[in-house]
Image (cartoon, coloured by chain):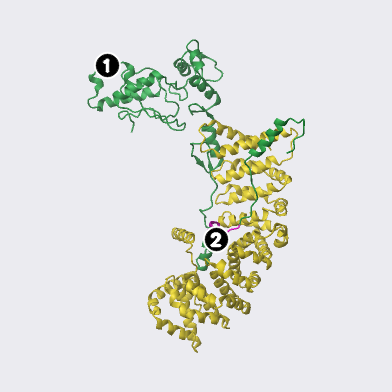
Chain colours: A yellow, B green
Amino acid sequence: MQSVSLFVAIALRQARRDRQLVSKRLLLNEDEDISMETIPADQVRVKQKIFCDIYVFFYLPFFSQENSMHLLVSFLTGSNTQCRLHAIRCLHELSHSPHPSVAPTCLPATSYLLTYLSGQSTKFTELCLYTLGNLIPDSDVVKEKLLAQGIIPALASCIENQRHHLAVVEAASFTLSQLLQAKDAAETIMSKVLVSTLPSQLLSVLTPDPQFGLAPAIECAWCLHYMACSQNGKELLACGALSKCSSLLWSLGCAVREGNQDEGLELLVCPLLRCVGNLLSFCPANSLTDQVGDVKLVVALSAFVQAYIHSRPALARESAWVLNNLTAHSTDFCSALLTHNLVPALIQSLAFSEGINTMILRVLANIANKKKEFCVELVQQGLLSSLCATLKMADAEMVTLSLEVLFMLVSRRPLPRSGLQTRSRCLQRIKVCSTLHGTKQNSVNTQPETHLAQQQGQCGAER
Amino acid sequence: MIMRAGQNQPAAAREEQQKSEIPFNFTSQIVHLHKDHSLFEVGDVNRHLYLQDLYVCETDAPNPAVSVSQFACHISGCSAVFIALEEYEHHYNSLHRHVCCSCRRSLPSARLLDIHIQEWHDSLFTILAQRQDMYQCLVEGCGEKFRTSQHRKDHLVKIHKYPPDFRFDKPKKDKRAKETTRLQQKDTEMEVTEEVCDSEGVCEVLCDVLCHHPESGESMEMHVSEKEANGMTNHASGTEQSSEPPRPEYFNRVPRTVCFGHGSVRGFRGRRGRRK
């Protein structure tokens, strides 16, 4: 089973690299046969999905006939509400199929689905939303038609009117996220979304409901992430997105630090991290503390790095990325890392690969880059001995960054009693290290490398 | 930088030049990532799995993905990689510390390196050695000196109980021996490989099997050749040695003065003499 899941993961990663990762959601029928109660829930879902796929495979040719879809639409819009429900389920299951002819087949029904979004039957609306969400990535024709017919204002009204029905809100956010992932979303869709009430509504849903759970917040967070990825995302700052996402991250960070074992917290942490990370790039340095709020956010981010470094290293890396963006141009946030005693744990993380250590080293470099006093503190907390190890790593970027940090630490320390001579000797040594690192591939004579090792040893000894 | 009149200008100019030569230019940067960035790959796949109801929350499953960063030996030509810093340091200290820059042989200590350089790469030594005892005993504190490396070797074996094939006491091969081996090459169809010393490799010294006159107390090569000679003459078909008149010694085996160095892959790779 493990090898199968590994294979699936590899296949999905490749699909993502090929920009062909299309996610569809299947809303399973809860009014199922009672005989299924004895079977574990996840097995039931698997069985239903398999059944759905088989069903679609056999019946798709039938529905491809124009008359057949016409018949289905007539049930969908007819006076018999039970028939409507069956029809929408049928359409929904069709939409979940990855078969390429599904979207054109369902095209005649889409305008009706859109109309029903402003209806009052929550279950029906939910199914319509997921059906539309599944069809959008499959076909540009469907997407263009829906945009022309006003899907964005329709989604905005839907969320507003149904905000007490979190299942509908979740479905609407999912559909919006499918729209926002389109290749040309930045040009065509983003501007429409930003002028609507959607950003503020998404932000209001962001705080998870304790009873309903994380799901609606997760969908909203993903929508915000896709918006923040584009250059138009800076408009989100005006809605207070950075502040809201940061405070939510802070709460989640506290929960993680306390060892909260809630399943799936990381599903919300991930898109929030990305929002904050990208929104920070739009935020002017002088208003950073205002926008983000408390500098203690660094505590939450460090907690994520430590909590996920073994179980979810990619998430730990994203947390480190946000830390880099926070500390790049802000002395306050750098100082907070020192005052909250977070640096030793960061230094420990320098041992790990998967891109974590390079990002962490950037954070430490940001700190060293700010002030002489920070350099002194970093040295006191043991950064030099770690640099002696990182200088020997196989990753070229790590070695380069280590040299940069070492240079900053040495050149910015207050002068020792021996004065200029010691400093210039140290700088000479570091320069030698850097030159040798840069020309290591071309060097023939081993003696300089021996010299390099001696420099490294001596650099470590000089504290 | 403003230079005051009367200041030591060359020193100040030097420092200015030093500063401009410094290649360090780290600047803090905010990184904005687009939605398809590779850093987001794993999270996107997890999101996909979540939407497909296939997401697994459990964190106690062993994760093979997280790994410790590797250390790599930075010596050019050495591609060794290590998981632990201690392994790397051991490797470096063992192999790259006392290396002769002329011939790239690695010696285990500074003293042996000094002796090696003196005996192998110092022409003054060669001249002096013709007239006086120059080969010093390898045992630190002994202080004895000898006229030839063979005498030293005998001393090491008899007095200090060293093995006769001590790896760090190979005498240098001289030009005469090179010519001799070329002659041998023609006769016995062997090839001399002129490869670079690999200080870590096993000494692949293989020599001419056609040894008739074993000498006592010789180095490893001789022992090997003797055994192989005994073995091979039984198998060799139409071997010329038995039928031809006895040749001078140096045509039939690797001379004493031929040294392949510690761990060198330079050596004869004769088809007959090859150990399989």
- Helix, strand or loop at label 1? It is loop
Percent x, y of residue A153 = 59, 77
Classify mark 1: residues with Cα within 10 Å, few (<14), some (14-19) or many (20+).
few
The image shows residue B133 at horizontal and vertical percentages of 50, 12
> Is A164 displayed left or right of A179 in the figure?
right
Which subunit holds the residue at mark 2?
B
Over which residues does the magenta segment extend? B32-43
Near-viewer residue (B43 or B276): B43
First in sequence: mark 1 vs mark 2: 2
In the figure, B171 relative to B72: above or below? Answer: above
**Nearest the camera: A327 or A50?**
A327
The chain letter for the residue carrying disc 1 is B
- Say which residue label 2 marks: B43
Q: Is residue A433 left or right of residue B156?
A: right
Q: Could you say which disc has been placed on residue A303 in the image?
A: none
Kind of residue at disc 2: Gly
Q: How many marks?
A: 2
